[in-house]
Image: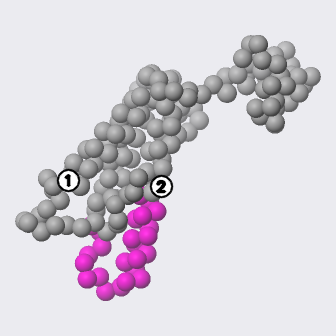
Amino acid sequence: MEGMDHAHIRGMNASLPSSSSMNNGTMMHGMRHKMMMHMTFFWGSNATILFPGWPGTRPGMYVVALVFVFVLAVIVEWLSHCRLIKPGSTSQVGASLVQTLLHAVRIGLAYMVMLAIMSFNVGVFLVAVAGHAVGFLVFGSRLVKEEEGVKVASDLPPMSC
């Protein structure tokens, strides 16, 4: 970025001020810091996951972020395989509304996991995959899927890739 002129940078972001309004290069330094974003996988605890400035630079907060992504992935799997509506429910409209709400929550959480993975942090990617795997093992595999020989169906259709 040192060799780039201001016009080239302005081409990347039209809202940047002209070079005459920059004060001693401090704005340029701030822009350089904000424009830095990983576009390939990297390993490290200094990542931005889901929200600006989160988890920050403290390694303990990075672990909290990893646990958060893991739990989100497990919840997505639980919602994909849960049975909250009792068979033979009398209110079709009420059951349909609950099913629609569950679908919206599941998709919203799945998108949050996807956005976390888009931080390109290897740790986030690994815990998201692990969360989906553990969630499927607990809620979707044959281990717990069949109760006394009776197949238990989900309220929601499987997620399509």
Give the x, y percent position of residue 18: 89, 27
Q: What residue range appears in magenta?
A: 83-106
Give the x, y percent position of residue 51: 55, 39
**Element on which disc 1 rests:** loop
Instruction: Say which quarter of the image contains residue 149.
Output: bottom left
Position of residue 40 in the picture relative to residue 4 (left or right): left
Residue 91: tell me if it is visible.
yes
Q: Amino acid at mark 1?
A: Ser
Per the picture, the main secondary structure of the magenta-coloured stretch is: helix
Position of residue 19 in the picture relative to residue 161 (left or right): right
Residue 56: tell me if it is visible.
no
Q: CA distance from mark 2 to mark 1?
A: 23 Å
Position of residue 14 in the picture relative to residue 63 (left or right): right
Residue 151: say if magenta: no
Between residue 130 and residue 48, name the one nearer to us: 130
Q: Residue at 40%, 80% (x, y): give it.
A: 94
Determine which residue is flagged by label 1.
Answer: 141
